[in-house]
Image (cartoon, rainbow, N blue to C red):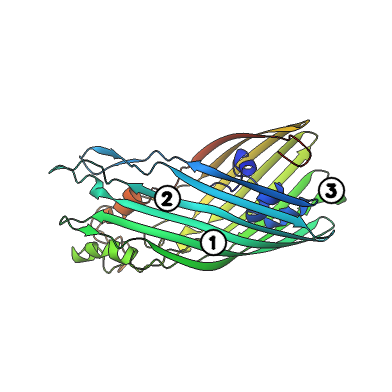
């Protein structure tokens, strides 16, 4: 997701240096220091991807995986003038396709009837400390993941082993500095680091890639690790009168993450621009988010990219998994959102 929470999403995903109180618990936990008493935010994203794919000269088929509900709950609490706590549960990522109903003919495999489903949810508890304009925070993360890969192999047999699940730990760090005390009213800088989280999905990638070993395409079956990549990001926020401007840059390090390395994913640069206008008891938000595409087309020729690599004997097999199984990202998002406060404590 470009962000967790409707406020950051309304601002194009920007939120490393602009506080959304409880909603900032995962984005940059140092920003929960805006909390005055207790802040509670809950909601969800209805995710409706429109995905289609075409193999060679065969017909184009639409994926039936076109509806997902992704929940989020965040709570932040001010203990005293220096210490703050946050806790939350967030659906953070997921992707998949469903070509089971794709029509199959002698010249059309029906996109191999590929069915994939990756779901990630994170649970975290944040501790933040603020002194003057400086705020520091740490969030230990427990990540739950499930993965399912199923398709029809070249010989017509079914490849798949059901759904695999795993739990593992990571950690997020956040820091912000408010320059108000330095004579620059409204300017805030922020930075975040999110560690890698290694997930082991039993018999998923190894089963899915074994037929490509049997046909001499891959040198060996992949292992079953699919690592959530590390992220590093910086942000700038500036507020003047009723206007708030935000800019974030972050890098998602796919090329160093287990599993995604084998599929040839590259590091992803993400730019987020956000704007908010506040008037009385309502706020209007708008934003733009651009993320470089982490997937590149693997060469289809016979060249060897690296000895023993999965791109040898041509990269069509990698392209197949990346495009049929995990069409990961949209490069551009344009967003609009808003808030209306019914009372001082409910919006």
Q: How far apart are marks 3 and 1 (CA)?
A: 31 Å
Residue drawn at x 31%, y 66% is 206
Residue drawn at x 71%, y 58% is 175
Q: Where is residue 285 in the image (x, y as percent from the top left)?
A: 65, 34
Q: Earlier in the sequence, mark 3 or mark 2?
A: 2
Q: Is mark 2 on a helix, strand or loop?
A: strand
Image quarter where the C terminus lies is top right
- Is residue 224 shown to the viewer in this render? yes
Residue drawn at x 48%, y 57% is 120
- Marks 3 and 2 in Cβ contact (< 8 Å): no
| Snapshot quadrant of residue 186 | top right
Can you tell which mark lies on residue 180?
Answer: 3
Q: Name the residue under label 1.
A: 230
Q: Is residue 190 left or right of residue 58?
A: right
Other-residue count near label 1 (Cα within 10 Å), few / some / many at <14 / 14–19 / ≥20: many
Mark 1 or 2, which is nearer the eye?
2
Q: Nearer the viewer, residue 176 or 114?
A: 114
| Snapshot quadrant of residue 272 | top right
Q: Earlier in the sequence, mark 3 or mark 1?
A: 3
Q: Position of residue 96 (x, y in %)?
A: 38, 50
In this view, the residue farthest toward the left is 106
Q: Name the residue under label 2.
A: 95
Can you tell which mark lies on residue 126?
Answer: none
Q: In this view, does 15 lie to the left or right of 45?
A: right
Q: Position of residue 79 (x, y in %)?
A: 80, 60
């Amino acid at each position: 997701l470009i962000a967790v929470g409707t406020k950051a999403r309304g601002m194009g995903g920007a939120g490393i240096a602009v506080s959304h109180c409880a909603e900032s618990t995962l984005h940059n936990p140092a920003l929960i220091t805006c909390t005055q008493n207790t802040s509670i935010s809950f909601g969800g994203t209805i995710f409706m991807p429109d995905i289609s794919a075409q193999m060679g000269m065969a017909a184009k088929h639409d994926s039936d995986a076109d509806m997902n509900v992704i929940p989020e709950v965040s709570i932040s609490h001010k203990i005293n003038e220096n210490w703050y706590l946050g806790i939350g549960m967030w659906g953070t990522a997921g992707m998949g396709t469903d070509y089971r109903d794709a029509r199959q003919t002698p010249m059309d495999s029906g996109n191999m009837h590929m069915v994939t489903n990756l779901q990630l949810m994170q649970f975290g508890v944040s501790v933040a400390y603020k002194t003057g304009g400086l705020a520091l925070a740490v969030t230990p993360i427990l990540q739950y993941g499930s993965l399912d890969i199923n398709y029809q192999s070249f010989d017509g047999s079914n490849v798949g082993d059901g759904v695999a699940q795993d739990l593992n730990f990571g950690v997020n760090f956040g820091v912000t500095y408010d320059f108000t005390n330095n004579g620059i009213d409204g300017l805030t800088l922020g930075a975040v680091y999110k560690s890698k989280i290694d997930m082991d999905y039993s018999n998923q990638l190894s089963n899915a890639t074994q037929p490509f070993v049997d046909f001499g395409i891959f040198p060996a079956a992949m292992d079953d690790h699919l690592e959530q990549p590390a992220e590093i990001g910086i942000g700038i926020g500036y507020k003047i009168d009723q206007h708030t401007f935000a800019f974030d840059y972050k890098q998602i390090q796919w090329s160093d993450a287990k599993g995604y390395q084998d599929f040839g994913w590259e590091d992803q640069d993400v730019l987020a621009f956000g704007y908010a206008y506040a008037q009385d008891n309502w706020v209007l938000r708008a934003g733009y988010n651009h993320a470089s595409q982490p997937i590149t087309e693997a060469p289809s020729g016979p060249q060897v990219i690296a000895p023993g690599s999965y791109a040898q004997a041509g990269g069509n097999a990698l392209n197949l998994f990346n495009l049929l199984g995990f069409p990961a990202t949209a490069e551009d998002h344009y967003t609009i959102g808003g808030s209306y406060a019914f009372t001082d404590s409910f919006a």
